[in-house]
Structures are given as C-alpha cells and as structure tokens.
C-alpha cells in the first residue's frame, strides 16, 4: 500500500508520538495544542483548543473541567474528535473516538505536577459559566488559596478525558496539493486497524 517514511509502522499511537516529538523541535510553542470538537444537544458542533497531555498505548488524554461546556457535551455524547496541526511541519493528525474520564491516580499526579497558581485557578474557575468581572475571579482565587493551602487536592470536577480512537488520519503536505493521507480505522478499541490511503 506504499506506506513508508514518516507514515511507516504498525502502531498509530507510536506514529503520533513520533510526529509530536518532531513538532516539539520545530513549533514555536504548544506543539501539543489540539482543536477539540464536540457536539451539543442540538447537534451543533463546538470546537476549542486544549493541550494533549498523554499519548498512551491506546488513547489520547487531555485535562479539563468536567462541568465546562465541553465537559457537558462529552458527558452527553461520549464522543469527541480533535485535530493536531503543525504549520512548521505542514502536517496534521485527525482523531475521532469515544470518551471516558481519567479521574484516578493518573489525574491526581498530573494535577499535582501543575504550578500552584494553575491548581488554584482550576478550583477558582467555574469554567464556561458567566463571570461578573475579572476581580471576582481574582477574589475567588485568593479565597481558594487561603482555604486550600499550599497543596490543594485535585478538584472532583476537574480531570482527564481519554479519547479511545476508532479513526486516526495522518496527513502530510505534498507538492501541488497532492497531499499524502492515510486513514486508520477500527470497529472499536481492541479491534484490528485497517489502513487506507485517501485521495487528498
Ligand atoms: C493553546 C490553548 C490551550 C488550551 N488548553 C486547555 C486545556 O488543556 N484544558 C482546558 O480546559 N482548556 C484549555 N484551553 C482553553 C479552551 O480553549 C477553552 O477556552 C476552555 O476550555 C472552555 O471551553 P468550553 O467552554 O468549550 O468548555 C486552551 C486554550 C488555548 C488557546
């Protein structure tokens, strides 16, 4: 099927890690930024950037507030999609799949690794809810800093979302818009992948 060079290999997660590692050397910032898509109850799509924190052996993990707009949409549908795009490499990776929460020790460890101000911010922000003023948020953060102390635990409403993909597409820019695309698909987690080259 002619999959070689940057597209070679039998493990799409290893391939994604390799591309991301390359992007870490070429992107000016946030090579792990993904545009995360969800749909609301009316089927209207929604998209925003988040940071991809782990590429595991069978999933992609980012962290967020479970009560946020995205958190609620994911809770309702159990589905999400994202795209990673690197201008410096002229490549993208697209992922679609089903979601589950990572709210165990892995989420605790990641939360604990964050800067204290970010941990306080996670407690203080009712993400995606209306806010009367910046001052109100700062006051809430100051209150949290006092009440939670120097080692705040992970908030119960904040943690990881793992996307178990059923589809992953690797795309690389080609001359004259004749880009290379390979789509990996499977029936569900644990099923074998089939890979097809797609027209650009
Ligand atoms: C580069 C970048 C990275 C971001 N990373 C995250 C993230 O990892 N988690 C998160 O909850 N929001 C992150 N945000 C903020 C989100 O884009 C968004 O504003 C927020 O999560 C609320 O989205 P929602 O109302 O659709 O839930 C990031 C924004 C940018 C621009």
Image: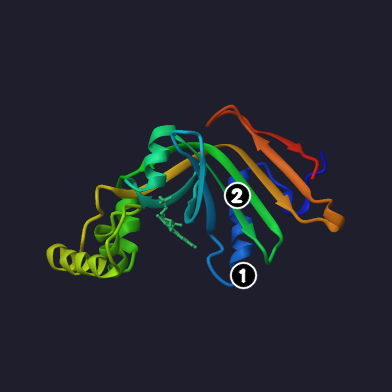
Q: Residues within 10 Å of mark 2 (few under 14, many from 20)?
A: some
What label sits on residue 25 in the rendered view? 1
Q: Are marks 1 and 2 in contact (CB under 8 Å)?
A: no
What label sits on residue 84 in the rendered view? none
Residue at the spot 75% in from the left edge and 45% down from the top edge: 181
Residue 86 vs residue 143, the one in the foreground: 143
Q: Relative to 25, is 73 on the left or the right?
A: left
Residue 74 vs residue 190, the one in the foreground: 74
Tell me where residue 113 appears, x and y as whole percent. 33, 63
Question: Could you say whether the residue bearing mark 1 is in a helix, strand or loop?
Answer: loop
Q: Relative to 195, is 138 on the left or the right?
A: left
Going from N to C along the chain, the mark reached first, 1 or 2, is 2
Outermost residue, bottom direction? 28
Tell me where residue 100 appears, x and y as whole percent. 41, 38
Residue at the spot 77% in from the left edge and 39% down from the top edge: 198
- Nearer the camera: disc 1 or disc 2: 1
What label sits on residue 14 in the rendered view? 2
Where ligand 1 lies, by image quadrant? bottom left
Task: Tell me the quarter of the image containing the N terminus.
Answer: top right
């Amino acid at each position: 099927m002619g999959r070689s060079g940057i597209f070679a290999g039998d493990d799409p997660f290893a391939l994604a890690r390799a591309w991301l590692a390359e992007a870490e050397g070429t992107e000016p910032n946030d090579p792990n930024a993904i545009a995360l898509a969800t749909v609301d109850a009316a089927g209207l799509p929604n998209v925003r950037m988040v940071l991809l924190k782990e590429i595991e052996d069978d999933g992609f993990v980012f962290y967020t507030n479970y009560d946020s707009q995205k958190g609620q949409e994911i809770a309702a549908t159990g589905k999400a999609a994202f795209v990673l795009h690197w201008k410096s490499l002229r490549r993208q990776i697209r992922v679609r799949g089903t979601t589950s929460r990572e709210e165990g020790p892995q989420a605790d460890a990641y939360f604990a690794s964050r800067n204290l101000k970010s941990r306080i911010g996670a407690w203080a922000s009712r993400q995606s809810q209306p806010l009367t003023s910046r001052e109100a948020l700062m006051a809430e953060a100051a209150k949290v800093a006092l009440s939670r102390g120097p080692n705040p635990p992970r908030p119960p409403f904040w943690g990881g979302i793992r996307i178990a993909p059923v589809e992953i597409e690797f795309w690389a820019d080609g001359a004259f818009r004749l880009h290379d695309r390979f789509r990996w698909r499977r029936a569900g987690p644990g099923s074998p992948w089939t890979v097809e080259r797609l027209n650009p």
